[in-house]
Image (cartoon, helix red, strand yellow):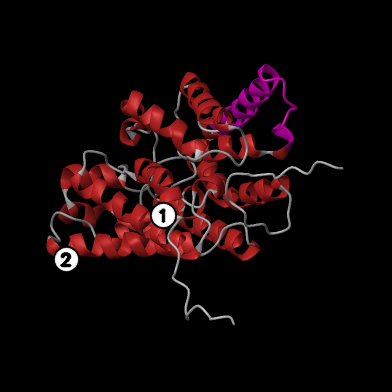
């Protein structure tokens, strides 16, 4: 008699017919418009940051495979994608050692320690990023990082300016169109809103990202920012400012919908996206951090399994059998 084993795996269980390699390659393709713009804007140093981030992330996974005596898995490009997304949030002036440490935390602690691909409860890139932001916050001062850059737009990071100057002053420095077209300081791949949106639409159209999380995430940003702005327009910025600055759009399309750390059912996805966005606005307006996207999404990664238990009640009544 043949023994059959029941294979139980971590969520998600949604499948679009493509391999993991194909999915990761397509996500990387979707990120290219924002990344290319970042390279053009921040120069050759941005290329070095991206290359080192991707290469070191793959190296850490290979080392973990060898130490645990498992078959190498870097060919699925999952660690390469983690390194790429991680690099998109970094300033182009990031020192090499910070990139190495960040990818180590992202791949080993954020992914491999939980069992590898598909088993991570948190977005690995955000795990690495949160460690760096808490350990060396001064390195994420974009105003200081790009102080030597000569640009033809307001040479300030929008969210940092908002924190210290207030909405009434910042409104004169940044227009929505400037922010959307990338005329701001920030992470290499997080400033060009148009490129991120185009990449996000591509992912939704191809079925690699379900629409529920990006749409509810954006709705959460707009609604919560509008509520604060209505209460005190001089202190709190408007909805479009929050949507188009910082890591917001990157969070909507590339960070919050990460497969293994987000819900898989429709209602939970809507709740997850909306409340993660609401937490971002709370952190920005009430907390001490300028952005809050990284910490807010990680918090709701933690809550994702609980949120995913929410189900609509079945309609109708139980039948009576003779």
Q: Is residue 175 visible from the viewing direction of this image?
A: no
- Residue designated by label 2: 230
Left or right: residue 4 versus residue 158 is right
Whether residue 143 sits left or right of residue 61 in the image: it is left
Query: Around disc 2, counting alpha carbons within 10 Å, would you say few (fewer than 14), some (14 to 19), or many (20 or more)?
Result: few
Q: Position of residue 288 (x, y in %)?
A: 21, 38
The residue to which callout 1 is attached is 307
On the image, the x and y values in percent for residue 310 come to 42, 60
Q: Are marks 1 and 2 in contact (CB under 8 Å)?
A: no
Label 1 Cα crowd, 10 Å radius (few <14 / some 14-19 / many 20+): many
Tell whether 165 sits left or right of 151. Answer: left
Is residue 236 at least partly visible in the picture?
Answer: yes
Is 262 contained in the magenta span? no
Q: Where 132 falls versus 271 (above or below)?
A: above
Task: Give the secondary structure at mark 1.
Answer: helix
Residue closest to the eye, 130 or 41: 130
């Amino acid at each position: 008699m043949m023994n059959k084993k029941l294979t139980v795996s971590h969520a998600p269980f949604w499948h679009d017919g493509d391999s993991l390699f194909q999915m990761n390659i397509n996500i990387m393709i979707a990120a290219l418009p924002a990344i290319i713009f970042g390279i053009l804007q921040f120069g050759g140093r941005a290329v070095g940051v991206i290359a080192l981030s991707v290469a070191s992330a793959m190296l850490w996974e290979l080392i973990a495979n060898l130490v645990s005596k498992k078959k190498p898995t870097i060919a699925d490009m999952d660690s390469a994608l983690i390194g790429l997304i991680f690099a998109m949030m970094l300033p182009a002036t990031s020192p090499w050692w910070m990139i190495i440490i960040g990818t180590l935390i992202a791949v080993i602690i954020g992914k491999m320690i939980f069992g590898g691909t598909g088993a991570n409860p948190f977005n690995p890139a955000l795990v690495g990023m949160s460690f760096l932001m808490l350990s060396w916050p001064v390195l994420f001062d974009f105003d200081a990082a790009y102080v030597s850059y000569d640009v033809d737009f307001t040479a300030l990071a929008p969210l940092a300016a908002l924190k210290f100057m207030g909405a009434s002053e910042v409104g004169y420095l940044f227009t929505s169109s400037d922010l959307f077209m990338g005329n701001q300081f920030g992470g290499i791949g997080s400033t060009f809103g148009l490129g991120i949106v185009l990449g996000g639409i591509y992912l939704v159209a191809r079925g690699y990202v379900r629409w529920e999380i990006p749409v509810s995430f954006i709705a959460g940003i707009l609604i919560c920012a509008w509520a604060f702005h209505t209460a005190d327009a001089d202190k709190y910025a408007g909805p479009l400012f929050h949507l188009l600055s910082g890591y917001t759009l990157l969070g909507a399309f590339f960070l919050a919908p990460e497969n293994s750390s987000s819900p898989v059912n429709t209602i939970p996805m809507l709740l997850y996206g909306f409340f993660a966005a609401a937490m971002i606005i709370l952190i920005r307006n009430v907390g001490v951090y300028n952005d809050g996207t990284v910490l807010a999404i990680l918090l709701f990664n933690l809550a994702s399994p609980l949120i995913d238990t929410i189900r609509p009640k079945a309609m109708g009544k139980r039948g009576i059998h003779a």
